[in-house]
Structures are given as structure tokens and as C-alpha cells.
Amino acid sequence: MPGAPGFRPVTNVADRTASVLGDPEYRVEGRDKVTGAARYAADVAMPGMLHVAFVASPYAHARIVAIDVSDARALPGVRAVITGEDTKPARLGRRLQDWPVLCWDRVLFIGDRVAAIAADSAAIAEDAARRVRVEYEELPAVLDADAARGPQAPVLHPDASSYRYFGGDRPSIPHPNLQAYAVHRHGDVDAGFRAAHRVYSHTFTVPRTHQAYIEPRAALVWLDGEVLHVVTTNKAPFALRQQMAASLGIAEANIVVDAGHIGGDFGGKGLSLDEFALAYLARASGRPVRSVTRYADDMQATNTRHAATIALTTAVDADGRILAHTSRVVFDGGAYAAGKPVATLLPGDAMLTLAGYRVPAASVEAMSVYTNQVPAGHSRAPGQPQNAFAAESHIDLVARSLGIDPLVMRERNVVRPGDIDITGAPWHGTDGAEVLARLRTAAHYAEARTTPHSLGAPAIGSGVALGVRHVGRGRASMVLRLSRGRVELRTGVADQGGGAYTLFQRIVATELGIPLGRVTVTRGATDAVPNDPGVGGSRVTPVQGGAALDAARKLRVRLAELGRALADAGDLEVIGEASQETHDASMYAYALRVLVDVETGSTKVEHATLVADVGTVINPVALRGQLEGGFVFGLGQALMEELRLEDGRVTNPSFADYKIPTIADVPPLQVELITGDPGPGPFGAKSVGELANPAVGAAVANAVQDAVGVRVWSLPITAEKIWAELTRPDEVREVAGSAED
Amino acid sequence: MKFTHTATVAAPRAKVWAQVMDVPAAARCVPGVASVRASGNGKYQGTLAVQVGPVRLVLDGDLAITARDETAGTASLRAEAKDSRVGGAIHATMNLALAEKGGETELRIDSDLAVMGRLGEFGQPVIKRKADQLMRDFAECLARQASAR
């Protein structure tokens, strides 16, 4: 492409560590996947297996007056019909169990389930579901996170105090319709505002999005004597075992959860729904029961990324240096908080409203609100795309208002080791100055800023944005067995596509100094391997990878103690463990170039440069795949993705109407890696799975403003929104983007 | 989903009003409508067969005139219909307004459509396209009838 900066290959790390790490890897499970041999949950069948259909609420908020299942039950081929009367008071959820397995009293969103049917075929089950007659009394629905916090709002969860919360006491909430509420303060905020040269306030909104994994959820459940077997698409099988045990009143020892290959997760597959009702159906029918969620139901009734409204106010000095910051983030949590695994019950990084900068004083308020909308849960880098879109748009607006170049503004404020950041703690992580210096060079920033615009051609603009992501934390363990000179690593980590098994194989082979071919990685169900925290939270490389490294080190120590070589040591077994409580974080930054058609607002991202601090590279191909995939994931949210809801119903519940990027939408992406700053993971590795997606939206918004002078305040940044701003009278436009002093 | 449709019928308002309020006759102007009959109290029962994308739906249901004001030329209708094969239902509120403009009548219909169950999976653009088409055919048919009388 003319004028595009030269492509540079992934930084070679061959010289940094032992042999194998520098070489491009082959996926250990790659052959099974490309040949179709890999089995996913929906591929698993059992003799005598029944198929399941659910009856779901057509109302956003209603009382169940009566349910008549007699016609459904009478249909030939129907083996079991259950309603909320059979499952109450069982509720499900990852941290807070607030979601009824089947509703018995009220339904709280369109898609909330009231009955389940197991039948000889999926068609019969669906037919029976249509014959269930439910009488509802419609109740006023709360569809808006602001309305839900009003004094007149109906309380959606009057029995919230009785819900099970894993791990201590649930944080207190100031309004009954809040799922979660948190505040953070550090420094002298008032003094910062008093000393300010200017104070800027801006408000941004981000819609619900779906994770858009290829594989819809599926589950197969059966009883073998007392033992409940669960085949699932859940990426955290041990956590699901704990949730099911608590919800169903079964001992964990009597539940076996088996999660194999998972066809995409992107944060959404940590929440299980069907598995719970299936346990009742398996008991009622005495047969194995399987459900495969229809994709439209997956989009209407599972857990989406939170919609959010983010209000930011920042005080700066005359040079644009941040003095103090206040923010308020309101997440629409939907009908249930069940999808959120973290103790705060907020989406992961809800409080990071100005991440990556020196923030001497801050007051941050964040909340997640119950509404009668689709429940919200976790999605790749939870909370961050919302906050990064707001923060990085905000910083750009401040820079432009002060007449400071947006990259210079960031260079003046970016966090460096030891600086106090938005968390109020000293920053442990990437030197932000290095990231921005690399970005300036790699993106040919000075040239890009002065590219002349020719008449009649689309307007050209460039935009920058940065983001941060913590390195994964948690505890994990796995077993390493040596037998006849070969080692086998047994792990409970499910394969959701990130390349975990290849990572473990390379770590073990590198540590033991043996060829990759002598290391096998096998996955076990929850009864066959030690406890594992599951995939998520950018955890696999630093935590589970750490356990694999620990196992290899222990084996090496044992061999040394025995004075034996690997080949003639006989049979040995060690357990590797890792506990990662790091506060390390990584930084990345984008420079994008967009073309905007000034007549229509149509926008195309023409080129992207990504600089990312990744530490030591273990899987070079997968690492690049995660960064590129993260960029494309972020690009979808930036330009086109929005789960549109009307009166609580998703109006675009298929990929015909819900657009995600295809390869035609993806511009050349130049990736620059910073590998010289070791992280807390194996051999100095960091995390990359959730590193690259959050900042894309703001980079696009900033580039659009650079190109045509208008600001888009919400995602996605569509041609319609740009056109509306372009055709809006100037005085109105200025009010929308005004600063307050 | 909320839609607004407008159409112009080349006939005076009083004539169009009479046409529209004769529900069984007016319903025959909607392609695919079969067997509309009055069930008393301003209510009607009927069936609408439509092809939406690749799927043929047979919607069985009731229509009720919930308000009418001939002087103002406005009326409200409520329709509830379900398809038992695909699974799903439609609840619709329609507000009709007739305005005379130089011997012609402008017909405006504001609809609020709740599409429930499987039918909701068609997605808004598909349903909107179908509603647009039905409404266009309806208006053309009314105009034909008006000029024929």
C-alpha cells in the first residue's frame, strides 16, 4: 500500500532463552482441529441420550401466574418435563448465585427460562416446549440503568440477601437494584482541582456486545449411580463443579466436569446455564440429556459485555499534566450478576478509568445495575474496552483543546515504574515512555501527521490510544509423570483455542532440555487432575504456565537427587504448583490511520501499528495470533458491533444482523514487540490474550476527529454517527464537546 | 419495534375511513389474509399467511379496535397473533390517523410491534422489510378499491 510504513517481522527472541522458545511452534492440538478429529461438547453423544429444549419468557418482567405442561407431557417421545416448581430455590452463578435454574415466581428478562423438556429428539423437545402454556402477568420493566436506581423503580431482587455468594461476605450496596458498587480515592483530589489550569468533563457510552464465539454453548449430563457427569463448553471446569455442588446440593466429589476443546470463549464461556437444569432432567428421566444452545438464544439469553456510561472529569495544568481525576462508571448488569466471577461483582477492570497515566489524585465510582435486560458478564478484558474508549477519547479531547499534540500529551503523562497510577499504587510494569517512543518511531508519527489531504479524496486522520492489562493472577497445579524417558503433563486446563498445551509442552521441554517430541500434554476431567482455576483473567501463561515450569523444575531436582538421567530414571511423578499474586501490568499502544468519506461518514481503518510489551515470547505464532486477534476483536467493537435491544429484546440475534469484522475489514497491522522487560511468568513471560483489544475504539474515534474534526461519543463508530456530527450545525456540535472550567 | 408507514389514497377522508373501519373488507387488502370474521365487541379473528425470508408463517389471532374517533380521523387497534409451527407470537398496537389533503387522504399508521419467541430471531431488518411490503400493498389496494367505488 502506498505510503504505508514498512512491515516488520515479530521480534526474534531466539537469543534470549534456551533453544525452543525462538522457533515458531506447531500447535499440539492443531492436527486434530484441522482434520476434524477434535471433539467439542456438542459432538459428544451417548446411547439413549435425550435432547433438551427450554421454555423462555417473552416478557422482560412478568409474574408467572400458571404453567400448564399437560400437553407437552402428553406428546409421544417426551421423557421429562420440569418447571421452576421442581428446581426452586436453586439458583446458579459464578460468584453470586442469583439466576434461577428455572424461574418459579417472576421472570426478569426476555429469555429467562421457566420450563425444560427432555425428549427423544430435538424436534420433539422443541415441539413440546411450544405446547407449554404459561400465563404471565406483565410487570413494569426497568430497561435503563438510571431508571433502575430511581426511588420508584421496582426492586428486581427483593430476596438478594438470601443469595449464595462464594468467598466471604458480599460487598454492601447503597441501592437494592445495584449488583455491585465500589469507590476508590487516593491523593488530594480537591487540591488538584483547585490548582487546575483547566478542568474537562466528558461522558461516553458503550453498548452491549456479544463475544461472538463460533461454537454455541452445549452440555451433556448424565448420572452414573450417585455421580453426576457433565460434559461442557465451560472453560473453568473446577469452578463449574463448585457452582453445581452448591446449587444442586451434591458433594463436589460426586460431580465430574469434563471440558475438552472449546470453540471460542472470549470471556463468555465461564458462565454455565443449561448444565444445572440438565442435572434435574437427567435425574427425572434416568437418561443422559444433552442441550445445544441455538445461537439466537445464545445472543438473547446468556451473558454479554456490559453496556456502560462513563463520565470522566480531569484537572490539568497548563502543560496538560494530569493533576486530579474523578469518574463515574455505570454498567448495565442486566437481570442477573451471575456471569461475573470477581469478588466485587463488577466487570474485571471497572475502576481503571484513566489507565496508563500518572494520576496523583483520583476519586473513582463504579457500579453495576440490575435491569430487565440481557444479563451481562465477562468478555475479553472485562470493563476495559468501555473504560479505555472513554479515557483515551477524553485524553485526546483535552490535548486538542489545549493545543497539544495527542501523542505529546500522552508522553507527558504516561506512567513509568514507581509512578502513582489510577489505582493509587505505584506502577509495576512497562515503562510507558518506552512504549510511546517505539510507537512514535514505528508508526512514522511525524510523517503521518503531516500527510497532505488532496481535494475530493477521503479525509485522512491518524489517532493514537494506549491501554494496560494486568498479568494474570491465581493458583494452579498439574501433574508431571516420567515413564521410560518420556514425560507426560496432565492438566485440567480446557483448550479454548489460546494454545495452552503447546505452551506447556514448550515450557517443560525447555526446562528439561529435551526435544518437544518427548513431552506429551494430556487434559483430564475434574476427577483425574489437580484443581485448576480455569482459563481466564490473562492467567494461562503466567499461572498455569508457571505450574508446568514448577513441575519440570521439580522433576529435574528429583533426577539430580537420584543421580539419574531422564532416560533411565524409571517412573517418577511430581506435582507442579504456581501461585501468582503479581501486580505486574503490561502496556500497549496503537497508532491508526483512517480514511473518512466526508459526504457519507463512511470510515475505513487503512493501517494500524501496535506496540506491545509482552516479555519473553514462548509461543511466537500464538502470541502474534492473540495480538492480531485482539486487534480485530477491538476493531469490531470500534466500528460495527452492537447488540441492539428494544424493550429488552435483542433485535439482531444472528450474524446476519450482528456484524463482526471479516478479513475485508482488517487493515495491515504492524506489530512491534517489546521483549526486554521480563514479566513474572515462565522465563519472563507476560500475558497477551486480553492485551490488544480494549484501546482500538478510542484510537479509531481519535483518528476520525483528526480526519474530519468531529467527535463520536459512543461505540460503535458508524458512518451514520459521523455523518450526523458532520451535518450538525457548528454551534450545537461545540456544545456537545465543550469543556467546563 | 416501532414503525411508521404513510400512504396516500386518492379518495376523500370519509370514504377511506369507512373502508378502513370495515375490518373484514379492509383486511382483504392485506395479501395473505384469510377468513377474517367478527367475533363481537369490536373484535375480529383471522389468519395471515406470510413468507418471511425462507420461512412461511401462518399467524392466527385476534384484532380489536380499541379506540376510534371519526371526527379526528384516528383509531387504535390491537392485534395478537401466534404461529404454532415456528413458535412465537406477535403483539401489535397500531395507531391510525387519516388526514385529508386536497381531496386525497393521507393515511399514517404508527405500529409498535413486539415479536416474541422464535419469530424474534428473524431480526428487525427482515421484519421491517416485510411490514413495509405489506403496508405498501395494503395502501395500494385501498386506493384501488376507493377509485373503483
Image (spheres, coloured by chain):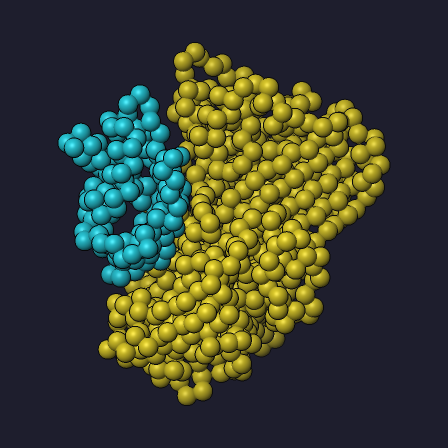
Chain colours: A yellow, B cyan
**Relative to residue A259, is residue A265 depicted above or below?**
above
Which quadrant: the C terminus of chain A? top right
Which quadrant: the N terminus of chain A? top left
Locate residue B137: give its quadrant: top left
Total labels: the figure holds: 0
Instruction: Give the image location of residue A467, x and y in percent.
Output: 60, 41
Q: Residue furthest left?
A: B148
| Residue A665 as seen in the image, left or right of residue A241 | left
Q: Residue furthest front?
A: B71
| Residue A496 as seen in the image, left or right of residue A78 | right
Instruction: Give the image location of residue A63, x and y in percent.
Output: 49, 65
Residue occupying the point 53% across, 50% down: A143
| Of residues A173 and B129, the one drawn nearer to the viewer in this rendering | B129
Locate residue A36: give its quadrant: bottom left
Residue occupying the point 56% across, 66% down: A98
**Relative to residue A97, is residue A587 depicted above or below?**
above
| Residue A471 as seen in the image, left or right of residue A79 | right
Report whether residue A551 is seen: no
Residue occupying the point 40% across, 13% down: A456
Residue occupying the point 66% across, 23% down: A401
Locate residue B131: give its quadrant: top left
Report whether residue A39 is seen: yes
**Relative to residue A193, is residue A268 depicted above or below?**
below
Instruction: Give the image location of residue A584, x and y in percent.
Output: 66, 51
